[in-house]
Amino acid sequence: MRFSGWRVLREGLTGNRGWQGHWRDPDPKPEYDAVIIGGGGHGLATAYYLARDHGMTNIAVLERGYIGGGNVGRNTTIVRANYYLPGNSEFYSHSLKLWEGLEQDLNYNAMMSQRGILNVFHNDAQRDSAVRRANAIINQGDDAEILSRDQLREMAPLLNYDNNRFPIQGALLQRRAGTARHDAVAWGFARGADQRGVDILQNCEVTSIRTEGGKVIGVETTRGLIRAGKVAMAAAGRSSQVAAMAGLTLPIESHVLQAFVSEGLKPIIDHVITFAEGHLYISQSDKGGLVFGSYLDLYTSYAARGNLPMVEHTMEACMAMLPAIGKARLLRSWGGIMDMTPDGSPIIDRTSIVGLYLNAGWCYGGFKATPASGQCYAHLIATDRPHEAAAAFRLERFETGHGLMDEEATGAQHNLH
Ligand SMILES: Cc1cc2nc3c(=O)[nH]c(=O)nc-3n(C[C@H](O)[C@H](O)[C@H](O)COP(=O)(O)OP(=O)(O)OC[C@H]3O[C@@H](n4cnc5c(N)ncnc54)[C@H](O)[C@@H]3O)c2cc1C
């Protein structure tokens, strides 16, 4: 079934009786060429690109819950390509280009909205750093502009420009950045993969990874043993637990990150806005809710919910940066489990076990990576060679210390990335 304006019109006139399910609900086969552990954005995108780019269709995505129930459906939906360091920079640049054609490619409305991101700075040091970042982004071939305080005020008049502690000096703007409807991205990739023959198996938790003579041979699941010569981990916040099933210890800690949504309001914020002080990021959804978040909860956990101190901190940051928000009521909040690496950059690599692959360490920035991560991981799984856009995401950098990409320059402390 293809979606189009004509189709919407026809269904509207005929009682909406022609819509079909977006993907099948098959029983697991005893054996596949490859299985992917984790039906989040990255796992589903990987399946889609394995089928589309490499013709691998005898594959399955194994999801312990329902697809879209993990971080892919819990994030604050920000998509951008404003990274600074080589390695990250070309990867996220590649990802944004994929985002720009994704809806046409998937024939699915992911509500991609290139409304621009404003990274607000408050002092001279932050302005210098923003200028350096803008130069790096432009050198990479993407767009970046530095806005003065007056230019910023025209675009975002409701900000607190004269806060005593955090006066606003200006902002780094990337116009091509924006937001996408997070769970629609999971559904779009799921539908695209299913159409190409991929089995999406929900309520199918992997409980152990089977190996023989240093090679992977399959996985035990709550729906039985599934054999596969290639097993690809894409379990995000649970990556360490899944890798431990094969006896591997990852350089990853799992931390909670919360998100918040206000009641629906008339449009008051046209862009995504992030603040360098207080580490707050905020945008307004198409339904009118203000969508925002700030720091990690600062303790390790596998619980997909957060605690009150970070709720208070986030609300205080909101009041300092955008006092008008004090009139809005908070509607919902939730948490997700972040797979934090010591340098804040991800891993797409083979492991020491033949046929076992790792995609993890997305920290709190993996949503924007979804299409490129899937495409690069699929390339690695199909060819056993890294994709050129993800060539720097090697696991061994944490063992050797070479090639670390400490984007935030905070040192090897997981919770600070
Ligand atoms: C509050 C919050 C805000 C965020 N904001 C942004 C943002 O604005 N921009 C951005 O780029 N990123 C953001 N992120 C980060 C981003 O959401 C994640 O980095 C990304 O979604 C992780 O990849 P994923 O989609 O594959 O993860 P997930 O959706 O979590 O997928 C992993 C899947 O693996 C499954 N799984 C785990 N163990 C097993 C098992 N044993 N067997 C089978 N399945 C298993 C899980 O159930 C889960 O569905 C945010 C995250 C959170 C929580």
Image (tube, grey):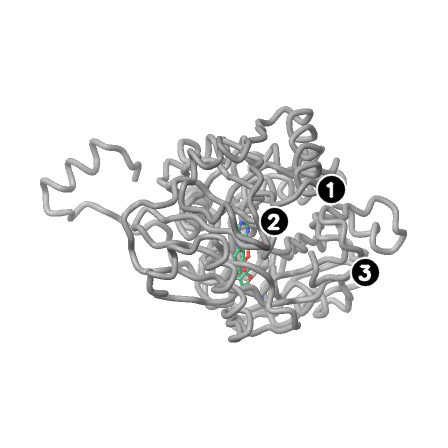
Q: Position of residue 277 (x, y in %)?
A: 60, 53
In what element is the residue under mark 2? loop
Judging depth in this view, the residue of 349 and 213 nearest the camera is 349
Q: Residue drawn 34% across and 54% down?
A: 289
User: Nearer the N terminus, badge 1 or badge 2?
Assistant: 2
Judging depth in this view, the residue of 142 and 347 nearest the camera is 142
Residue 355's place in the image compared with 213, above or below, is above
Amino acid at the residue labelled 1: Asp
In what element is the residue under mark 1? loop
Q: Residue drawn 70% across and 36% down?
A: 128
In what element is the residue under mark 3? loop
Q: Position of residue 243 (x, y in %)?
A: 70, 65
Q: Position of residue 48 (x, y in %)?
A: 51, 43
Q: Quadrant of residue 370?
A: top right
Give the position of the N terminus as an image quadrant.
Answer: top left
Q: Position of residue 375 (x, y in %)?
A: 59, 39
Badge nearest the viewer, 3 or 1: 1
**How far is disc 1 from disc 2 in space, using C-alphas?**
40 Å
**Total marks in image:** 3
Pointer 1 and pointer 2: residues touching (CB < 8 Å)?
Answer: no
User: Nearer the N terminus, badge 3 or badge 1?
Assistant: 3
For disc 1, the neighbor class at 10 Å (few under 14, some 14 to 19, many from 20) is some
Which circle marks residue 384 in the picture?
A: 1
Q: Which residue is mark 3?
A: 214
